[in-house]
Image (cartoon, rainbow, N blue to C red):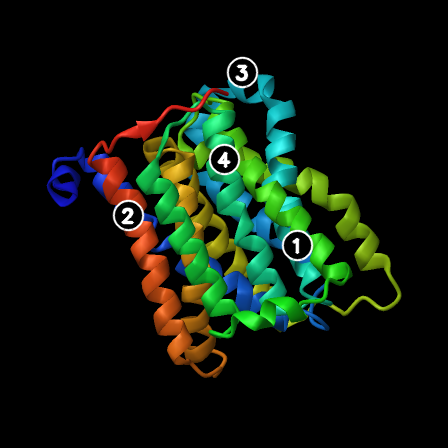
């Protein structure tokens, strides 16, 4: 039985399976901040502050490992810049830019494509195997995402209109898939925390000139207490905590299994919007949530059970 196979899994794998359920909840903090940031702090300044603070914390925690592996760190600097650009710049500042002109429905639908891209890339590029049952689980989860974001009215899909903000979000979703796959493709001798510290540095280097430009803009809001609170919140929760969990579980579970958890994002976001922002919950949230969780469970349990897989040639 799948549940028996899951219980027999190594302790590290069981811990990883537990942690990835908290990861989307941590990322909802970024959603709340993105809605409150306009007029308080500009997108690149927020991203710069977030990853500078996160990078300093992670570098301090992993300083001994980074010093011991300094030659490997220096050798991998081109990869570090690419990962920093994908994961911290495009998936950070560009999401804040997109949120200025596009709605939550469009953002949720667009980002729902990221796990699909990761799953396909894992099979075609990384050589991971994907079973028929796992593919079914992805489809069920995706249908749950759509059900939540269209509020149970699937006819709303025909009423979507793409704006400039959607382009920013599309680029962010594609970049997130690349960020996930490249971490798996480019093997690193560093631990998860040390590697994330290096990626933060790469991201800060890429973001810095854009942030300086925004700070010198005539209409840039002054950095006040609220902006600092937002920077600290995004650095500690969806920054250090969520990204570390993501990087570590990628090593333990593989890109395709971790990616499917991104489907739970709209479900977590709906709960947080209700509890923090006062937005109402509807029956469509329950129905969509059941579909999402069913699909995620199907992917996790079938792979743990070693279900028959369909080999795909890269």
Q: CA distance from mark 4 to mark 3?
A: 34 Å
Confirm or deny contact between disc 3 and disc 1 (CB under 8 A).
no
The structure residue drawn at horizontal position 40% and vertical position 47%, both measured from the top left corner, is 138
| Quadrant assignment, res 272 | bottom left
Q: Which residue in the protein does label 4 denote?
A: 120
The structure residue drawn at horizontal position 64% and vertical position 48%, both measured from the top left corner, is 172
Label whose residue precedes the other's in the sequence (3 or 1): 3
What crowding class fits label 3: few (fewer than 14 Cα within 10 Å), some (14-19), or many (20 or more)? few
Q: Nearer the viewer, mark 4 or mark 3?
A: 4
The structure residue drawn at horizontal position 39% and vertical position 42%, both measured from the top left corner, is 135
What crowding class fits label 4: few (fewer than 14 Cα within 10 Å), some (14-19), or many (20 or more)? some
Q: Which residue in the protein does label 3 denote?
A: 71
Q: Which residue in the protein does label 1 denote?
A: 169
Look at the image and tell me in which quarter the N terminus lies.
Answer: top left
| Quadrant assignment, res 107 | bottom right
**Residue 271's spot in the image, x, y percent?**
40, 72
Location of residue 192 with respect to 141 vertically, above or below: above
């Amino acid at each position: 039985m799948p549940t028996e196979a899951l219980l027999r899994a190594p302790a590290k794998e069981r811990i990883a399976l537990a942690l990835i359920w908290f990861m989307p909840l941590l990322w909802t903090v970024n959603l709340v901040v993105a809605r409150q940031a306009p007029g308080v702090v500009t997108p690149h300044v927020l991203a710069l502050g977030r990853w500078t603070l996160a990078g300093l914390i992670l570098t301090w925690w992993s300083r001994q490992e980074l010093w011991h592996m300094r030659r490997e760190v220096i050798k991998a600097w081109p990869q570090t810049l690419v990962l920093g650009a994908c994961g911290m710049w495009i998936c950070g500042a560009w999401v804040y830019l997109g949120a200025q002109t596009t709605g939550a429905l469009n953002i949720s639908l667009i980002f729902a494509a990221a796990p699909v891209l990761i799953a396909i890339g894992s099979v075609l590029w990384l050589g991971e195997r994907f079973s028929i049952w796992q593919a079914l689980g992805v489809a069920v989860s995706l249908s749950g995402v759509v059900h939540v974001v269209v509020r149970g009215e699937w006819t709303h899909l025909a009423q979507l209109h793409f704006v400039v903000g959607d382009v920013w979000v599309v680029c962010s979703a594609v970049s997130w898939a690349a960020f996930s796959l490249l971490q798996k493709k480019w093997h690193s001798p560093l631990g998860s925390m040390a590697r994330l510290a290096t990626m933060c540095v790469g991201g800060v280097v890429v973001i810095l000139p854009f942030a300086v430009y925004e700070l010198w803009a005539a209409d840039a809001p002054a950095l006040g207490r609220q902006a600092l609170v937002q920077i600290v919140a995004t650095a500690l929760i969806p920054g250090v905590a969520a990204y570390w969990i993501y990087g570590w579980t990628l090593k333990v579970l593989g890109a395709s299994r971790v990616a499917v958890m991104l489907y739970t994002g709209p479900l977590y976001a709906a709960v947080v919007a209700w509890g923090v922002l006062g937005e109402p919950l509807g029956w469509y949230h329950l129905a969509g949530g059941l579909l999402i969780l069913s699909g995620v469970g199907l992917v996790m349990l079938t792979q743990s059970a070693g279900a028959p897989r369909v080999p795909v040639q890269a």
